[in-house]
Image: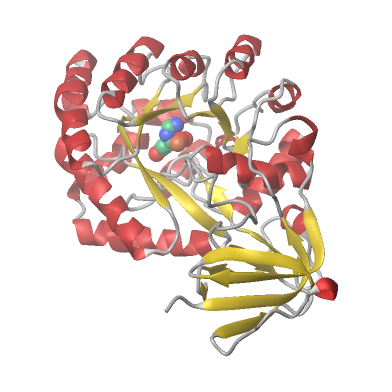
Amino acid sequence: MSKKFFIKNIGTLYQVRTSLHKLTGSEFGKVPALHNAWVSVEGGRIKAWGRMDEFSGFAVGRDMEVIDADGASVLPCFVDAHTHVVYTGSREAEFVMRLQGKSYEEIARAGGGILHSAEKLRKAEENQLFEESVERVKMMIKNGTGAIEIKSGYGLSLESELKMLRVIQRIKNHFPVPVKATFLGAHAVPGEFKNNKAGYIQHLIHEMIPAVGSEKTADYIDVFCENGYFTSEETIRILEAGMRYGLKPKVHAEQLSHSGGISAGVRCGAVSVDHLEYANDEDIALLKESETIPVLLPGAQWFLGLKNPPVREMISAGLPVAISSDFNPGSCPSGNMALMMAMACTMYKLTPEEAYNACTVNSAYAMDVQNYCGSVTKEAKAHFIFLKKGYSLTSLAYYFGMPVIDKVFIADRFF
Ligand code: NIG
Ligand code: FE
């Protein structure tokens, strides 16, 4: 029998919505809320909600567990639509090198960066990779994340990319939160193809993508479109090859330079284009004519000391801006979405409501979970952040890095 819960005495229940769509314009700044509220849950899904003072007292039967929020506020979990959380070892030494003046690109050219993580991952045993990654996902859930996209891209060989995708599938089966998998074989050119990028692209298109496609272990295909990685034209070819196997496109776009990732992504009907520090007015106009979600990754931007993307311009143009963490060992060793909210507020001057909408409803669209994650709607997954008493949605950003989250309810248990 599916478990029932009645959560009562909620100070403020945030993100209560009757209809769902991407949030743009004036709606982007509003988070509909209900004060002094209750919500009922059955089988891990939200069934009903209302105000305590209007509660008609439906049968709170013996089969229903009552959770008393005691005046604390409750809000839907964050949706993190861009992570590389499956990896092994850290890149702390490179962090220190960057503090001493080396750039991300210089470190990568010297064999560090993505290739360094690939070297470690290829040697790692699958179970060890799984155990390490599970610990990170647990931390993410405890920090309020209720849906996660995870990319491959530290294998860069057929065998190791498939190993990563298997680990992502195991994570999906291990946790009660939705997990989407992205094949990112085009994250970098591996050492054995150092002077033969064309050869690696052939290998990607004719060996790796067909294998990934037939195993059906990935939902999306992604490419790092960047100087020294993959060009806009190569990005299109790789995305199109993936699309032939049912993989939906995503792009790492305009992070370190303007490389044409947005136009490649829009042309292929990408679900999202992510990073966007070097996006320009033409890119914004292209996005405006598309269904592609622009995903900002303020943690990676901050950690690498990059410039701001044109965020207010995107919002003014009516784009449904989303925010995610990019949790990875090189450019953002954090999957703390409340911290991403805080950064979006201080760096982009988003209001806490705008930042929260970008981290929930809009980011849900960036990983196709909008119908059941990121808002309080009928039949949505009951994934809730319980704040400590006296704290609000604004507190999540204001007390940056502080543990204002008391506990996280996922379907039928607390994390
Ligand atoms: O999203 N930009 C490319 N990929 C990652 C960084 C990966 C790494 O440095 O390991 C990112 O920032
Ligand atoms: Fe990334």
**224 versus 296 height, above or below:** above
Q: Do we see residue 112 in this rendering? A: no
Q: Do we see residue 213 in this rendering? A: yes
Q: In this view, does 69 lie to the left or right of 256?
A: right
Q: Is residue 316 left or right of residue 123?
A: right
**397 versus 235 height, above or below:** below
Q: Which of 311 and 343 is in front in this view?
A: 311
Query: Ligand 1 sits in which quadrant?
Result: top left
Q: Residue at x 54, y 38 (%)?
A: 365
For the N terminus, which image quadrant?
bottom left
Q: Which residue is drawn at 76% across and 30% down?
A: 25
Q: In which quarter of the image is residue 219?
A: top left
Q: Nearer the viewer, residue 8 or 225?
A: 8
Q: Nearer the viewer, residue 93 or 412?
A: 412
Q: Is residue 165 left or right of residue 315?
A: left
Furthest residue in direction bottom, as rendered: 62
On the image, the x and y values in percent for residue 159 come to 15, 41
Q: In which quarter of the image is residue 239?
A: top left
Q: Which residue is drawn at 31% across and 42% down?
A: 117
On the image, the x and y values in percent for residue 356 come to 69, 47
Colour setup of the view:
secondary structure
On the image, the x and y values in percent for residue 67 come to 65, 81
**220 versus 243 height, above or below:** below
Q: In which quarter of the image is residue 385?
A: bottom right
Q: How many marks?
A: 0
